[in-house]
Amino acid sequence: MSRIGKQPIKIPSGVDCKSEGETFRVKGPKGQLERNLHSNMKIEIEGGEIRVLRPTDGRMDRSLHGLTRTLINNMVTGVTDGFSKDLNIVGVGYKVELKGKNLTLHLGYSHTIEYKAPDGIEFEVDTKKNSIAVKGMNKEKVGQTAAEIRSLRPPEPYKGKGVMYATERIIRKAGKAAIGSKG
C-alpha cells in the first residue's frame, strides 16, 4: 500500500469538494480548481475527509495512487492557503518592476523583458531587495511561471549573477588564476 496514497485528506471548513466521474472540483475561499484524474482511481468523500482508493495492486494503479492523493491535496491547499515561490535577482544593474499585473525585467540585455502574468498568477515585487514572489492557487502554474522567469537569465557560476530561487545555492567556480610572469 502506498504510504502517501493511503493517508486521508482532511477537508478544511469553507472548502467544498465534488467528484463527478473523472473530474474533481475543489471550491474554497481563494477560488475554484478543477482537474481530470485517472479513471482507475476511486475517490470517496465522507466525514470531512477525502480518501483515494485503488482497485488493484497492479503496477499502474500503485503508481497512480500516491500521485492522485497528492494532486488532490495540492488542490485543497491551493484554494485555502495558496502557493508561493520566491526569486532573487542578483547583479549590478539588474532590476525588476511591476507594471499593472506584468513584470518588467532589466537583466543585462540591450532590451527590457516584459513578462505577462498568466491567469491565476500574481506577482509581488520588492524593489529594495530585488526579489519577486510568484503566488497562485495552482501549484503547477506557480512552479512553471517561476521556472520561466528564472530561465530568462539563469545564475552563472563565476559571479553568481542572474535570477535564482531564494532557496537556491550557487556553487561558485574559481576564475582564471593569476600566473606569475617567468623570466
Image (cartoon, rainbow, N blue to C red):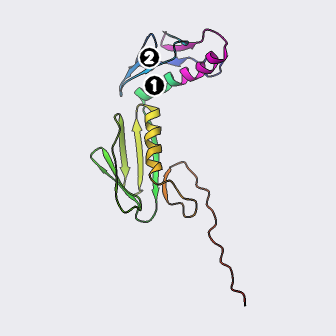
Please indicate whether residue 161 sits to the left or right of residue 120 in the image: right
- The kind of residue on which mark 2 rests is Phe
Instruction: Please tell me the numbered disc located at residue 24.
Output: 2
Q: Nearer the viewer, residue 142 or 59?
A: 59
Q: Nearer the viewer, residue 94 or 6?
A: 94
Which quadrant holds residue 158?
A: bottom right
Q: Residue at x 62, y 57 (%)?
A: 171
Does residue 140 lie above or below 23 as drawn? below
Instruction: Please tell me the numbered disc located at residue 75.
Output: 1
Marks 1 and 2, Cα distance to the nearest angstrom?
Answer: 10 Å
Q: Residue 167 location, x and y as percent?
A: 54, 48
Q: Residue 60 colored magenta?
A: yes
Q: Residue at x 34, y 41 (%)?
A: 117
Farthest residue toward the left? 100
Does residue 92 lie above or below 124 as drawn? below
Please indicate whether residue 107 sits to the left or right of residue 97 in the image: right
Q: Residue 80 location, x and y as percent?
A: 41, 27
Whether residues under marks 1 and 2 lie with C-beta atoms below 8 angstroms apart, the answer is yes
Please provide the residue range marked out in magenta: 45-70
Q: Residue 180 location, x and y as percent?
A: 69, 83
Q: Residue 56 colored magenta?
A: yes
Q: Residues within 10 Å of mark 1 (few under 14, many from 20)?
A: many
